[in-house]
Image (tube, coloured by chain):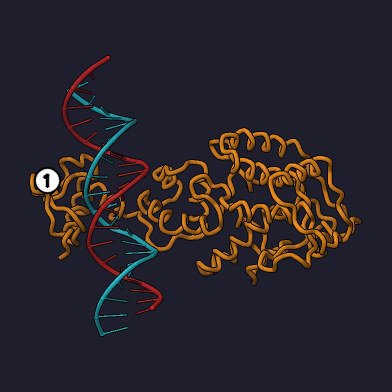
Chain colours: A orange, B cyan, C red
Amino acid sequence: MTKAASSTDQKNGLKKGPWTPEEDQKLVDYIHKHGHGKWRTLPKNAGLKRCGKSCRLRWTNYLRPDIKRGRFSFEEEETIIQLHSVLGNKWSTIAASLPGRTDNEIKNYWNTHIKKRLLKMGIDPVTHTPCLDIQQLSSILNFSLYDSPRVNHPPHFGMANNILNPSLLSLLAAFLSSSQNPDASNQTFQQNYQLNNSIQTFPLQENQSCAASQPLSLESQLMRDKIDQMISPPDTTNFSYQSSLPNEGQCQGGHNYPTSLLESHQIALNTRGEPNFTLGSLISYSTPSSSTSPSNLNSSASSTTFVKGATEEERDTYCSNMLMYNISNGLNIDGPCIL
DNA sequence: AAGCGAAGCAACCGCGAACCG
DNA sequence: GCGGTTCGCGGTTGCTTCGCT
């Protein structure tokens, strides 16, 4: 018998701590006969030396017949993250969307698994925004702004050649800016959200060469100047400025890339008007089925299939890669896009 | 095999909302 | 409208299990 199991409330003689099978049986039998509710009087009527609150908790979190036990599925996890990005710590509301799961179970799972994974991915679990440090973001921005050639990309990112994505860069720049001036963050994000929505998407033409260079738009140049003021420019002496478009595999067939990140909910706004980067959206890609590298995004295999069979570590690796790839290239479910 | 720290999870606690007389 | 009671939620605690040394 544990210390907690043997403890009792001195005033009322009520038992505390873990429930015994006998107590569980008494509670279940009583509720089957009389239904639940009136928790205050229930323990006395059921012959239990527990407070009503304890009985209610035991029933709703453990004994209820429709409780689903065991590991959370990928879909459940995705739902939790997406709902949390909108609702915050409203565990009971989140639980309402997950049949068989209790608020307590979801809360525990969040605190012990998801929170850690998001942090590992560089996402703030409270705000659902990137919490990469300035250096990491600067590095990403530099890759995009200075259009580094494929050969120089860090292999673990699984990057194809960059496609210039001024709106996403604006968001990242705003994030950098806000990290330097937190008071302005909300306003900056709102402005950039409007900016993103105002920028039209355009298709990548079939005859557009993968090796063709992409001239910087005026906006991008201004943004580059702005970011130059905040970060040190990279050493470009070894860069060859060859290509700014996706690799051959991704631009064949004259695909259109019409969906902006915002439209596809890849970046959703939270209640404070800031963009969210959620794990759930990140792993809703078409992805390779046999590799954790996100470099071959035009594969028709579903990411869900991959993630379902993946180990926890593989999920982490995959999601981290997706995050970095996503931030760098601004890809959505159909492949690269320009916001 | 033993010790120890970390992780996971069931249960508790305090507070606020809802309900009722 | 008010005060008392009940219920439910979210944060926290502490016990158990796991994994590493």
Picture quarter with the C terminus of chain A:
top right
Q: Quadrant of residue A139?
A: bottom right
Q: Position of residue A177 (x, y in %)?
A: 64, 41
Q: Is residue C4 above or below residue A63?
A: above
Residue depicted at x 62% and y 33%: A187
Position of A141 with respect to A128 (left or right) is right
Report which residue position mark 1 lands on.
A44
Q: Is residue A22 above or below residue A188?
A: below
Position of A53 with respect to A310 (left or right) is left
> Which one is nearer the viewer's eye here, A305 or B14?
B14
Picture quarter with the N terminus of chain A:
bottom left
Residue depicted at x 63% and y 37%: A189
Q: Quadrant of residue A322?
A: bottom right
Task: Name the amino acid type tagged 1.
Answer: Lys
> Which one is nearer the viewer's eye here, A272 or A33?
A272
Residue depicted at x 71% and y 47%: A169
